[in-house]
Image (spheres, helix red, strand yellow):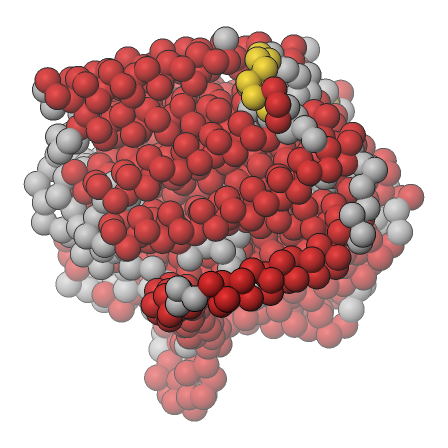
């Protein structure tokens, strides 16, 4: 079943490209159909996930036998959660791209390529395959920013490309070093085989691999591509960059860095936590000083990713569950926020905070959704963001009370930049636009995201139980509790 | 058994919230009647549950797992303490929602008002009956959200939007302390279930308990507007007056006091000492500011802060029952004062007391209601405020002498500021605005009358064993403070009478000139009018420290971090041009480079591989 998650979008990408030669509105229908179907498969994967246990091969084809590279896929609860998130957000992104007319065939083809690559990253059990998909995601992302972005798109796209490639390169060197010792790319075997290698060797490998993920998440100081890419990318692409592509880094951190090299992770856990904490505050302060909506959201997203890494670095059961929860929760919330930014732009609002104003007056429903999304992002209890933050903090406090104490101080800061933004742009001010409603294409994704954010926040138990065993195994590997 | 259904208490208003949100536009009064019905149902069920607690004692349910972990089972705990609070929230809440039908009539956003009020009452009720610290915290934040939304109800007014933000952020500072307290409790106790925490508390190190209880108290300081986080409450008066009465006088601001009372088993003598002094200081500084303010609602707001200080003080000095008793009485007389002030604002269309004068003739019912509220608040016998204030003073008296005198001065100021308000607004010559004033409609007057009865008579529950009942919430109740000794009671009456007399001599029969007093005490007056400069200090911190360092960091990010990146890029392009020169075409050159490279690789391999 997993292979269809990849094959279907690839086929869709080709179909979309050719459909684009016929008419400019056909590709979006193809993309919609494909992403709905992929979501269906993702739902089935999610349903089957509890039975899968921890990293088990579900599909295994010998691919390049001479190098022992296999086309092996598998999906446990962690993968399945991200597969579900990806499928949902790509669908949201397709709906957000409803008005794209310019070279729409290529545009949608790139979107679907990205979907295929993402699915591959989240299900690959072979490091070579993982790396291949990792790169497959990057190229459409570059093309989309470069071809359909804002005024400064060339610069932003190039920066994105160079940065992520630099990260990929370090990661690749790490993978090759691992291969050199173990002669396999299989994630499942590698961990056992690497156990026998010397400490220095494994440390070097770990640092290379970690750097690769740190570029992608990103962590300060590897973040400088992010604000430009997020703000210059077309909004539907930003939804994916912030919502899912950032999760590639987080997923890699958990699956590869922690999953394959747990002892090394434990050695560096405190350093990683400090780096994440710096990211949380650095980004929160930067967000406070932004005067453009998408840049504000970009830094906010960065800050929340820092929180996620804090949860992983706590190496505690509850913190790990919180981190996995945050992967999904942050994906949903940031997608909703950027979707709203897209809706604002579509209504003719300028996204400069000083020019944006009176949204509640001219588009009341949109205004309240922005209030809701901001509240979710600042961690209001009853919504999903709070559950993640609470469990991350509980876990972190058990291991590093001082770091947790500092992390708590970031919460009023986050509340500060969101409330200040709401006051200036949503309640107050007046952009002088006429009243406008919300179309069905806009309403559906908003309603689904709002419902999911609320549902996960009000009753997180089912999700927590889903990811509980995997979080437990990850943490047990390093002897945490 | 009716207590098994207590989880339904918050469900009614929650359902009302959802229904009004979805269909309120199609209902009359924006769904106001639905809200009244839902809150009324909650009230009836609450009364039934309360009577169960009175007759059979506490009830606790195991609850459902919220998080897939035993530490997070969310259920219901109703004991004497939550019973008192349940009564206050549901009963006063119901009266105020009824009053809203008149007060908010014709407001264009009234659907939103009733949705938010319903959500508020639902969250407040669940806060009261929660059996788990996280459950409490969730409700705690939701009431804060509703407070934020309702303060900013008229969001087009910049001052309202700004006050809403201020309230949210200042209480957020307290909230993170509460959260930190939860982290400590979870780490040390391994559970967040209240009764389990209480059971384990005696076995935990005192230092840990002190830390945890002080952090939790930090949450109370924010929510219950205690010094130094009291600054948000006076600004919160930007919301509709019904909101001020319900959220910012009768219920939500009591949540902090309730939290301290709820978590009482964790408080050590050291932390209680802090609680007592914070309460005493809050009571005093707020009362002193109330004397000089000229905005009708703000005076009452400062008075609320001051009385919340009294409750905190009472809990701090061990007067557990006295604090809860004052909480009950205050809810009545303060809601009454706010609602009658609301009726005044409704009639006069101004908040400045200098625009009001001689309203008694035009608004006798409102005037009487205000009079009763003022009498009760000022602590003159025999109405409710007198009894609880007296118990608090007795408890403070046996605790600390300096604190007792601070409380005594505060009690005097209380009488001064509230009678000053009454005499200025209702007596004297009719002002221009007062000529057009008229009495509020019936739907607003009936709640006033009921609250008046409460403000008059709620104090008498003390003779029906209220103290013993409330102490029943504690496993190890502190020694009940001895009932007011005759001299303390006499002093208390004397202080209230003096305060009343001073106010009368200044504002009713002007023997003392207020202007002359102001001139004589000019520095003090300036200090008070500027609210002890605390708001200035916070404003400075928010704009000059936080916002400026954010701007500075943004500069660092854009010029230094990004600059380095762009610089590296340029350097790469440049060095590419330079490196081209290496491609000399001379084979010997290439060979030497290859050799150097191979050597370098060997060195690297040797260093890291350790002889691979």
- Indicate the position of residue A256 as horizontal and vertical percent values: 63, 35
Which quadrant of the view contains residue B410? bottom right
For the point 81% across and 61% down, the residue is B270
Q: Is residue A347 left or right of residue A231?
A: left
Of residues A124 and B270, the one nearer the viewer is A124
Which quadrant of the view contains residue B395? bottom right
Tell me: residue A431, above or below residue A395: below
Of residues B571 and B135, the one nearer the viewer is B571
For the point 21% across and 48% down, the residue is A150
Question: For the view shown, which residue lies furthest in the front direction?
Answer: B587
Question: For the view shown, which residue lies furthest in the right direction?
Answer: B203
For the point 55% across and 18% down, the residue is A63
- Indicate the position of residue A372 as horizontal and vertical percent values: 37, 37
Q: Split into 4 quadrants, where in the image is the N terminus of chain B?
A: top right
Q: Is residue B214 left or right of residue B39?
A: right
- Indicate the position of residue B327 as horizontal and vertical percent values: 60, 47
- Indicate the position of residue B74 as horizontal and vertical percent values: 65, 26
Q: Is residue B97 left or right of residue A257?
A: left
């Amino acid at each position: 079943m997993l292979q269809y998650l990849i094959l279907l979008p690839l086929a869709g990408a080709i179909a979309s490209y050719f459909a684009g030669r016929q008419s400019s509105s056909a590709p979006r229908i193809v993309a919609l159909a494909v992403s709905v179907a992929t979501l269906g498969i993702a739902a089935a994967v999610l349903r089957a996930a509890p039975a899968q246990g921890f990293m088990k091969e579900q599909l295994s084809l010998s691919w390049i036998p001479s190098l022992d590279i296999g086309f092996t896929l598998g999906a446990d609860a962690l993968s399945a959660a991200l597969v579900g998130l990806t499928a949902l957000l790509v669908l949201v992104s397709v709906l957000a791209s409803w008005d794209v007319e310019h070279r729409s065939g290529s545009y949608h083809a790139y979107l679907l390529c990205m979907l295929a690559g993402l699915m591959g990253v989240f299900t690959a059990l072979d490091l070579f395959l993982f790396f291949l998909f990792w790169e497959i995601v990057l190229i459409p992302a570059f093309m989309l920013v470069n071809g359909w972005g804002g005024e400064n798109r060339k610069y932003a796209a190039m920066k994105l490309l160079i940065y992520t490639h630099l990260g990929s390169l370090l990661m690749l060197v790490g993978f090759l070093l691992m291969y050199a010792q173990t002669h396999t790319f299989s994630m499942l075997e590698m961990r056992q085989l690497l156990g026998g290698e010397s400490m220095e060797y494994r440390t070097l490998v770990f640092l290379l691999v970690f750097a690769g993920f740190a570029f992608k998440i990103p962590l300060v100081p590897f973040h400088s591509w992010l604000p430009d890419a997020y703000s210059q990318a077309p909004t539907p692409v930003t939804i994916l960059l912030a919502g899912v592509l950032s999760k590639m880094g987080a997923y890699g951190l958990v699956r590869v860095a922690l999953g394959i090299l747990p002892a090394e992770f434990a050695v560096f856990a405190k350093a990683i936590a400090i780096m994440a904490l710096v990211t949380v505050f650095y980004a929160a302060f930067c967000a406070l000083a932004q005067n453009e909506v998408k840049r504000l959201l970009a830094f906010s997203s960065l800050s929340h990713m820092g929180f996620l890494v804090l949860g992983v670095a706590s190496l505690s059961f509850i913190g790990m569950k919180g981190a996995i929860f945050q992967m999904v929760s942050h994906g949903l919330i940031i997608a909703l926020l950027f979707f709203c930014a897209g809706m604002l732009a579509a209504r003719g609002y300028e996204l400069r905070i000083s020019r944006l104003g009176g949204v509640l007056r001219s588009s009341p429903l949109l205004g309240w959704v922005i209030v809701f999304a901001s509240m979710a992002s600042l961690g209001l209890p009853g919504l999903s963001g709070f559950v993640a933050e609470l469990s991350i903090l509980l876990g972190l406090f058990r291991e590093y009370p001082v770091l947790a104490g500092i992390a708590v101080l970031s919460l009023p800061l986050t509340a500060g930049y969101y409330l200040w933004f709401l006051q200036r742009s949503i309640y107050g001010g007046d952009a002088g636009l006429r009243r406008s409603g919300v179309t069905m294409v806009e309403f559906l994704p908003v309603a689904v995201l709002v419902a999911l954010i609320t549902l996960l926040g009000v009753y997180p138990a089912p999700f927590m139980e889903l990811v509980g065993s995997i979080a437990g195994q990850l943490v047990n590997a390093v002897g945490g509790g | 058994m009716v207590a098994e259904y207590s989880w339904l208490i918050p469900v009614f208003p929650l359902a009302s919230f959802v229904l009004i949100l979805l269909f309120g536009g199609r209902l009359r009064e924006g769904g106001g009647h639905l809200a009244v019905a839902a809150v009324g149902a909650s009230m009836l069920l609450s009364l039934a549950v309360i009577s169960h607690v009175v007759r059979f004692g506490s009830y606790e349910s195991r609850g459902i797992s919220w998080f897939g972990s035993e530490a997070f089972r969310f259920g219901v705990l109703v004991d004497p303490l939550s019973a008192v609070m349940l009564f206050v929230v549901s009963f006063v809440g119901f009266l105020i929602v009824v009053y809203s039908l008149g007060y908010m009539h014709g407001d264009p956003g009234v659907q939103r008002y009733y949705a938010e009020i319903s959500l508020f009452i639902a969250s407040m009720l669940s806060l009261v009956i929660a059996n788990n610290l996280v459950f409490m915290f969730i409700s705690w934040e939701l009431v804060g959200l509703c407070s934020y939304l309702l303060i900013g109800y008229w969001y087009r007014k910049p001052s309202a939007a700004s006050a809403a933000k201020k309230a949210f952020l200042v209480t957020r500072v307290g909230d993170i302390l509460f959260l930190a307290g939860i982290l400590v409790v979870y780490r040390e106790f391994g559970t967040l279930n209240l009764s389990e925490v209480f059971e384990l508390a005696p076995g935990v190190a005192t230092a840990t308990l002190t830390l945890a209880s002080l952090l939790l108290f930090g949450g109370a300081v924010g929510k219950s507007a205690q010094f130094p986080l009291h600054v948000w409450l006076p600004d919160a008066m930007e919301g509709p007056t019904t909101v001020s009465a319900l959220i910012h006088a009768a219920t939500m601001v009591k949540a902090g006091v309730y939290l301290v009372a709820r978590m009482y088993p964790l408080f050590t003598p050291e932390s209680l000492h802090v609680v007592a002094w914070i309460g005493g200081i809050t009571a005093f500084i707020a009362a002193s500011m109330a004397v000089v303010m000229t905005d009708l609602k703000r005076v009452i707001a400062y008075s609320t802060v001051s009385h919340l200080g009294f409750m905190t003080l009472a809990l701090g000095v061990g007067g557990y029952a006295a604090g809860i008793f004052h909480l009950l009485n205050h809810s009545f007389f303060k809601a009454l004062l706010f609602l009658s002030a609301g009726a005044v604002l409704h009639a006069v269309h101004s908040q400045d007391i200098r625009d009001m004068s001689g309203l008694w003739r035009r608004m006798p019912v409102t005037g009487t209601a205000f009079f009763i509220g003022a009498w009760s608040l000022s602590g003159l016998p025999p109405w409710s405020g007198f009894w609880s204030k007296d118990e608090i003073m007795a408890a403070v008296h046996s605790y600390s002498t300096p604190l007792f005198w601070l409380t005594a001065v505060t009690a005097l100021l209380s009488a001064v500021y509230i009678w000053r308000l009454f005499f200025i607004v209702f007596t004297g010559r009719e002002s221009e605005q007062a000529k057009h004033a008229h009495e509020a409609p019936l739907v607003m007057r009936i709640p006033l009358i009921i609250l008046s009865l409460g403000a008059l008579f709620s104090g008498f529950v003390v003779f029906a064993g209220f103290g013993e009942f409330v102490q029943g919430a504690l496993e190890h109740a502190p020694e009940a403070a001895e009932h007011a000794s005759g001299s303390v009671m006499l002093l208390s009456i004397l202080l209230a009478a003096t305060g009343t007399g001073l106010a009368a001599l200044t504002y009713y029969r002007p023997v003392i000139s207020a202007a002359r007093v102001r001139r004589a005490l000019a520095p003090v007056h300036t200090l008070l009018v500027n609210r002890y400069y605390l708001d200035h200090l916070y404003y400075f911190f928010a704009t000059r420290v936080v916002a400026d360092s954010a701007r500075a960091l943004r500069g660092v990010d854009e010029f230094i971090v990004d600059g380095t990146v762009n610089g590296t890029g340029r350097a790469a392009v440049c060095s590419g041009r330079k490196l081209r020169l290496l491609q000399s075409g001379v084979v010997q050159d290439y060979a030497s480079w290859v050799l150097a490279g191979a050597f370098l690789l060997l060195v690297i391999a040797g260093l890291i591989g350790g002889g691979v």
